Amino acid sequence: MKKKSALFFTLLFSFASSSVLARNDVSDFSIADVMSQEQAKEALGNDVRFYFGNQRHGKILKSWGEVSTNKKTNAFLKSDQEACTRAFLSALITLKKRTLKEGGNAVIKIKSNYNRKVTNSSTTFQCGAGNIVAGVALLGTVVKIR
């Protein structure tokens, strides 16, 4: 009887854990909504400017080429909005650090690159959210602009 109970709970847990991990909803979120939050202003500061999609920017003085970042965050018991905001800010912080390391002051042409599907938008970013993990992948060009 113990063996049957153990087998039953093992199978139940296996099926339950697969369904928990299976969700991967890809959604678009507002860049402006995230960038206007106090949390974003504090985390990103003013050292590096971010230009999404085809937004206009100053004259490029030097370019270090395109860089990528892929950030995941814990989504357990968080709304998709909350988890995706955290992952997005983490990705931007990574781009900021890389830009400062190279000597740049801006990242231009920032695009979403979730699951290698590039989406070019000046108003939204893409995030994949599951029950446990949420992720944001970005591409952008590190530059020094006037």
Image (cartoon, helix red, strand yellow):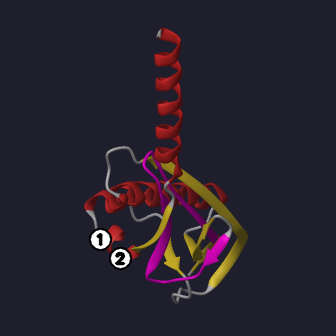
Up the image or down, 14 lies above or below 72; here it is above
Give the residue at mark 1. Answer: 36
Tell me the residue at 64%/75% (across/down): 118
Up the image or down, 125 lies above or below 77; here it is below
What's the residue type where badge 1 is placed? Ser
Give the residue at mark 2. Answer: 32
Tell me the residue at 32%/45% (across/down): 77
Q: Position of residue 80 (x, y in %)?
A: 37, 59
Looking at the rendered structure, which numbered label has been put on residue 19? none
Q: Position of residue 131 (x, y in %)?
A: 42, 49
The Cα–Cα distance between marks 2 and 1, rounded to whole angstroms, is 6 Å
In reply to whether residue 134 is colored magenta, the answer given is: yes
User: In the depicted view, which residue is nearer to us: 146 or 1?
Assistant: 1
Q: Position of residue 144 (x, y in %)?
A: 61, 73
Q: Is residue 48 visible?
A: no
Q: Which residues are magenta?
A: 117-140
Tell me the residue at 47%/10% (across/down): 1
Query: Seen in the image, is 81 located left or right of residue 19?
Result: left
Q: Position of residue 72 (x, y in %)?
A: 52, 50
Q: Label the magenta part by its dominant secondary structure.
A: strand
Q: Secondary structure at mark 1?
A: loop
Q: Is residue 34 visible?
A: yes
* Quarter in which the C terminus is drawn: bottom right
Marks 2/1 in contact by CB < 8 Å: the verdict is yes
